[in-house]
Amino acid sequence: MENNVKSYRKPYVRPVKANWWTDRGFYIAYMIREATAVLAVVVALELLVLSCMSQESIVAFLKNPLVILVNILSLASVMYHTITWFNLMPKAVRMFATKKPTDTKLIPAKLIISAEWIGAAVAFAVIVVACVCLV
Amino acid sequence: MSTRRSDEPIYWGLFGFGGMVIAFALPAILTLMILQGFGVDCFKLAAIAKTWWGAGALFVIVSASMWHGFHRIYHGLHDLCIHTTRVHHYVLYGLAVIFSLAALVIYASKFFGWCA
């Protein structure tokens, strides 16, 4: 919204410190959830760099203790992302059980989350089989 | 009054897609990478990146994770009391574009055999 009238409002803006989230578990959990994005980018970059290397170099790189540590931390971070992502899915997307516009019956959240975990288990199995057997 | 539509739905869509891709693909890939680090020979990335399905899947996984991650970092800056400007926007989404294009070139060259 733009207008050319000068505003004389002087609203009070409460000062917020950058550590506002440290005094409550709920806020800390929220910040950890958002921080999982950083390790997701790291993993994507690692995968991209590894894709440019020969199999011998990839194996040698993955044997590095520091790389193993980062990978384990990344796996923990990705699992936290997965759990929170699946749990917020029914809140972000409202899925209706029927197509009638007058009927607002939603598909139960538990059903959606269960379906997501079944899908994730299938995807896990497909990727493992693809990596171990198909090449 | 400006009638320009926001470009946010595009980024939000890529963020949502990337979140799903991370949740479905990265646990298995990271597990295989860690097992390979402990000497179990199961992560044959160099061979997979040369197949059409492997190159395609890896391109989607890498670029979608990048779009998801940089979108979340961009909006997370607000929570760290950093007020974002167009500069933050161009730098963070610019990185997502650059890494996506890099992934496209790398996996295309793997698949078509332009390099080893």
Image (tube, helix red, strand yellow):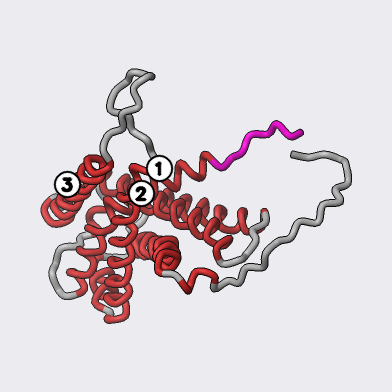
Amino acid at dot 3: Val
Amino acid at dot 2: Leu
Quadrant of residue A51 in the image? Answer: bottom left
Hey, which residue is sitting farthest bottom in the picture?
A: A65
Q: Residue at x 20, y 60 (%)?
A: B44
Quadrant of residue B92 in the image? Answer: bottom right
Query: With respect to residue A90, does A10 lie above or below?
Result: below
The numbered mark at residue A88 is 2
Residue A22 screen position, x and y as percent: 48, 73
Residue B31 screen position, x and y as percent: 21, 64
Residue B115 screen position, x and y as percent: 36, 56
Quadrant of residue A63 in the image? Answer: bottom left
Amino acid at dot 1: Ala
Viewer-proximal residue, A27 or B107? A27
Q: Earlier in the sequence, mark 3 or mark 1?
A: 1
Viewer-proximal residue, A118 or B56? A118
For the N terminus of chain B, give its image quadrant: top right
Q: Is residue A94 left or right of residue A54?
A: right
